[in-house]
Amino acid sequence: MNWKNWRHYIIHISLLLVIIFFLLIFLSIYAIFINSSAPIVSSYNNISGDWKSWILGVSFLGFFISLYYFIDYFKKLKKFKELINSDSKSKFISNLKELEIISYQLGPKYKDQLENKKKYWKIQ
């Protein structure tokens, strides 16, 4: 699978990672500070051992990185829709370079939308 296919799934992957890292943060905080005998926490304590603090730190880092990608995707999508739905051909042409960069980052579906809009405005 090449990068074009992975870019199509970046939103799904980042959302899944946000959820996983959030759960790891919750479990780590619960295991470090509360340390109850709940079955899930005791299983987590047995698996993680003395690594709970490291797992907490890495989970925070992973959570914020994946959250950044999740939010960044929607910012790019909003900007792409604003630029591609312009009513003026000159405005579309002036933003064409930025549209090409954003469509490449969002994936093949948006690249096709850009190509259709170029055909509509008769731009090569």
Image (tube, helix red, strand yellow):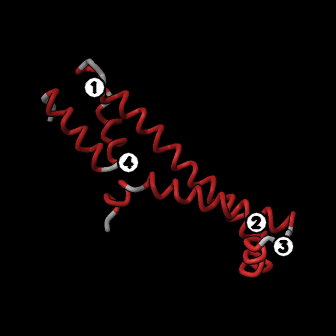
- At x 28%, y 50%, the residue is 108
Is the residue under label 4 in contact with that under label 1 (CB below 8 Å)? no
Residue 46 shown left or right of residue 62 in the figure: right
Instruction: Measure the alpha-carbon separation of dots 2 and 3.
Output: 14 Å
Q: Residues within 10 Å of mark 4 (few under 14, many from 20)?
A: some
Instruction: Measure the alpha-carbon separation of dots 2 and 4.
Output: 34 Å
Observer-side mark, 2 or 3, equals 3
Amino acid type at image mark 1: Phe
Foreground pick, 124 / 32 = 32
Amino acid type at image mark 4: Gln
Q: In which quarter of the image is the C terminus?
A: top left
Task: Tell me residue 64's x, y (percent).
Answer: 63, 52
Amino acid type at image mark 3: Ser
Task: Tell me residue 109's x, y (percent).
Answer: 28, 46
Instruction: Measure the alpha-carbon separation of dots 3 and 4.
Output: 46 Å
Q: How crowded is mark 3: few (under 14 residues within 10 Å), some or many (20 or more)?
A: few
Observer-side mark, 3 or 4, equals 3
Is the residue under label 1 in contact with that under label 3 (CB below 8 Å)? no
Task: Tell me residue 46's x, y (percent).
Answer: 76, 81
Residue at which label 4 appears: 105
Amino acid type at image mark 2: Ser
Observer-side mark, 2 or 4, equals 2
- At x 14%, y 33%, the residue is 119
Residue at which label 3 appears: 37
Observer-side mark, 3 or 1, equals 3
Instruction: Measure the alpha-carbon separation of dots 3 and 1.
Output: 61 Å
- At x 19%, y 33%, the residue is 118
Residue 6 shown left or right of residue 29 in the figure: left
Q: Identify the mark nearer the N-term, 3 or 4.
A: 3
Is the residue under label 4 in contact with that under label 3 (CB below 8 Å)? no
